[in-house]
Amino acid sequence: MSYTSVTHFSPGHLEWLKRMDFYEGEFDILDKRLEEIVNKNNKEETVTWVERFKNQFAMQRNNIYELRRGIQELAGRVSEDAKNHAGKMETRFVREHRQLNDEIKDFEKIVNDLRHDFNVFLSNSM
């Protein structure tokens, strides 16, 4: 097996977890906006769009949960491996870290697209 220093690895986990907290808070705010909209405008078309966004927000909350779990699991495995190998970890964790980073980037792109679509909806529903 090949090993590398764990020092190149660990700060990213905390940043990722903070970003997941941020997005979760953002979805709380967006959900409240949806409630305001449906209370002011209960036309069938508006209600349909509100339901679509609620479903999308719920789906992204699930993605946050899965990403957070993946981050925590990887951090735990890296920590355990570093304890067992004097501050070094198997290089396979670097690949897993990159893969998780790519998943987070994909998630963030989806959230940005969803946020854009939501803002367009807001501008059209007012």
Image (cartoon, rainbow, N blue to C red):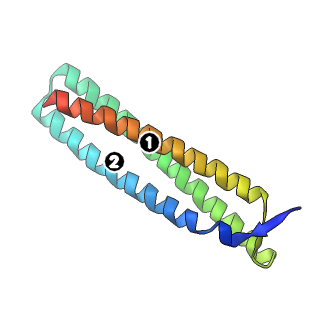
Q: Which residue is pictured at 41% across the width and 41% down the height?
A: 111
x%, y% of residue 22?
38, 57
Q: CB under 8 Å between callouts 1 and 2?
A: yes
Which residue was labeled with disc 1?
60
Q: Which residue is pictured at 30% across the width and 30% down the height?
A: 51
Which disc number belongs to residue 27?
A: 2
Distance Cα–Cα, label 1 vs label 2: 9 Å
x%, y% of residue 89?
77, 67
Badge 1 or badge 2: first in the primary sequence: 2
x%, y% of residue 54?
33, 36
Tell me the amino acid under the disc marked 2. Answer: Phe
Tell me the amino acid under the disc marked 1. Answer: Gln
What residue occupies the far top of the structure in this picture?
45
Asked which quadrant contains residue 112, the reply is top left
x%, y% of residue 37?
17, 36
Q: Nearer the viewer, residue 122 or 33?
A: 122
User: Viewed as shown, does residue 21 lie left or right of 72?
Assistant: left
Q: Nearer the viewer, residue 90 or 48?
A: 90
